[in-house]
Image (cartoon, coloured by chain):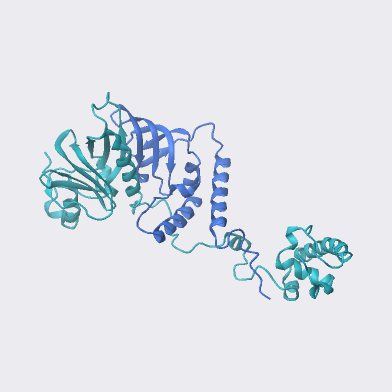
Chain colours: A blue, B cyan
Amino acid sequence: MEPEAAQSPSSSGKPVEVFNSIRERTITENSMVVLLQGLQGQVTTVDLRDESTARGRVVNVDAFMNVRLEDVLYRDRRGQLAHLQDLFITGRNVRYVHIPDHVDIMKTIESQLAKIHRVRNFASEGGGRREFAKKTK
Amino acid sequence: MVLLKSLHPPTEGVRHEQAETTAVIDGHRLGCGTLYVAETRLSWFDGSGMGFSLEYPTISLHAISRDVSAYPQEHLYVMVNGKLSDESEAEMAEKAADDDDDNDGSSSSGGDDDDEGVITEIRFVPGDKASLESMFSAMCECQVLHPDPEDDDSDNDFEGEEYDVEEAEHGHGDIPTFYTCDEGLSALTQEGQATLERLEGMLAESVAQQYHMAGVRTEETKPEFEDGMEVDAAAMEAGQFEDADVEH
């Protein structure tokens, strides 16, 4: 899933959307969040700051490490279990995100970065690499 | 017991409004009212106009619970950092500056409560269970509008304009990335020179073939010869192309 989908569908105007997009992309490619974004579709466990845990399928992780999970088994800090259909955890409250054993970390990071670079090049004015600018003679 | 405050429902930026919604705070049922998911804050009002509101930065998580064995009714679960105690969250935020005067330690805003681990559990039970997805999504959208300002881990100094990655990587940001043939030669490195000679060699071969076809560039011309740069290099080898009538 492209990083583009991680943005908030803001209705407050296009300029804000673009700013968040660029900023989020830059934050993402300069932090380990890029790895977490590569976990989309995987089932994993998130440990929260209050020591509760949530195990479910990763729907989305944004640049601020807000995590959205679905089909979640949530164990609160008292140890009580509950099933939650959808769960949104604020980035601030994430302590750990467990990376499943079968996930190749380097490959995931590389492929996520490649997606970001493709999006960046595609989105730049004129499309494609800007080296071959139009020549006027 | 939560004392409700007389607040006004938000009028702007309301992403979702859900009537017939019961609010339950830490197990205390407040009755039926309307939930407003607005971009600035989350609020709920009962029939008489009394209500409470929550600031998104104070919300740790929210979820859809359809597990009736855990809680008998399907609802939107919201975990708030800190206590709502005797005042609404909005009122507490307003009084943040006067913390010293009326604070008994249980309602300070921001970071203090994190250490104590005190939380408030709120459940919004809508009459229409099918609306839970919309309520949840609206909250997600509003939550991302309020990124954590105290986050020291992520470097948020990326306010500048987007840059050309390839320029930055090759360190030639202030140098034009193409040249006319004369000025370009002097800017080439040794390697660049060698590459240019090799390419021109290749070009000369194909140019020679084209020359035999009366100087008309055919459709078989490779795409890489189509851009301005290559035309100039070709001109060096076969200057007569400059004036030729090229039919495409």
Q: Nearer the viewer, residue B168 or B212?
A: B212
The x and y percentages for residue B28 are 15, 34
Please indicate whether residue B242 sits to the left or right of residue B132 in the image.
right
The x and y percentages for residue B56 are 28, 48
Please indicate whether residue B32 sits to the left or right of residue B65 in the image.
left
Residue B196 to residue A75: above or below: below
Question: Residue at position x 84%, y 61% from top?
Answer: B206
Residue A32 appears in the rendering: no
Question: Residue at position x 45%, y 53% from top?
Answer: A24
Q: How many marks?
A: 0
- Farthest residue to the front: give it: B247
The x and y percentages for residue B98 are 15, 57
Question: Residue at position x 30%, y 34% from top?
Answer: B130
Please indicate whether residue A9 sits to the left or right of residue B209 in the image.
left
Q: Nearer the viewer, residue B121 or B157?
A: B121
Residue B225 appears in the rendering: yes
- Farthest residue to the top: give it: B69
**Quadrant placement of the C terminus of chain B:** bottom right
The x and y percentages for residue A42 are 48, 34
Q: Nearer the viewer, residue B225 or B6?
A: B225
